[in-house]
Amino acid sequence: MAQRTKVLLTGFDPFDGEALNPSWETVRALDGWKCGRATVHARQMPCAFGQSIEALASAMDELRPELVLCIGQAGGRAEITPERVAINIDDGRIADNAGRQPIDVPVMPGAPAAYFSTLPIKAMVRDLRAAGVPASVSNTAGTFVCNHIFYGLMHRMATHPVAGQRGGFIHIPYLPEQAARFPGVPSMPLAAMVEALRVAVATALAVEKDIAETGGQFH
Ligand code: PCA
């Protein structure tokens, strides 16, 4: 029998005045879920520059997961969006939960400008759509704490390589109870997002080489 492996799923604590964060609500529902050879371990990350990368690094050291999927809230997006690229910049539009608002500072001084996700983002979008979940590739994770932890994840995997380890980031919409305060803003129910992450994890475990299918955009 193939050896069991671990999947680390992270979500954030609430920020920007919200009472909850859909990323943590979704991820924690999957803690302990067994997907084929892998078991999911859910961890909550602080929505704070610096601290989030430290918390992620200690979870990775503890678990040594085959797969790391960091999840975050993208209020206003209508779809599940696997992110293509993490950029080496912090530019907070608001302060983080620790009151810090870095503007135009690198996530890691002297490190590369960007890293690509090592998740099969196109295959994930294909499988999500096939499962009836609206999904698209996103070509920017922004410049707040989500891009920050995504960059920290990719930089760590580049500088502390673990054989076979892959990872990346997925942004998810508001929950309906959040969007109810912002008329016209899209949302997705918790159960649909939990199912979506099951599909994303299963595809990420199964597909090592991504498919060539367009996920491009004009702008
Ligand atoms: N979303 C924010 C940070 C935490 C979260 O869930 C972001 O997109 O940067």
Image (tube, rainbow, N blue to C red):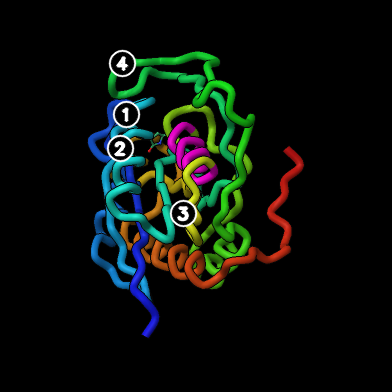
Instruction: Identify which amino acid the numbered label 4 is placed on.
Output: Gly
Q: CA distance from mark 3 to mark 1?
A: 22 Å
Q: Label 1 belongs to which residue?
A: 51
Q: Which residue is mark 3?
A: 162
Horizontal arrangement in the rendering, residue 3 relative to residue 158 (left or right)? left
Closer to the camera in the image, 163 or 109: 163
Of callouts 4 and 2, the N-terminal one: 2
Which one is in front in this view, the residue at disc 4 or the one at disc 2?
2
- Residue 32 visible somewhere in the drawing: yes
In primary-sequence order, the first of circles 2 and 3 is 2
Q: Which residue is mark 2?
A: 55
Give me the C-alpha separation between circle 4 and circle 1: 12 Å
**Range of magenta residues:** 148-158
The residue under the point 58% across, 23% down is: 110
Q: Which secondary structure lies at badge 4?
A: loop
* Majority secondary structure of magenta residues: helix
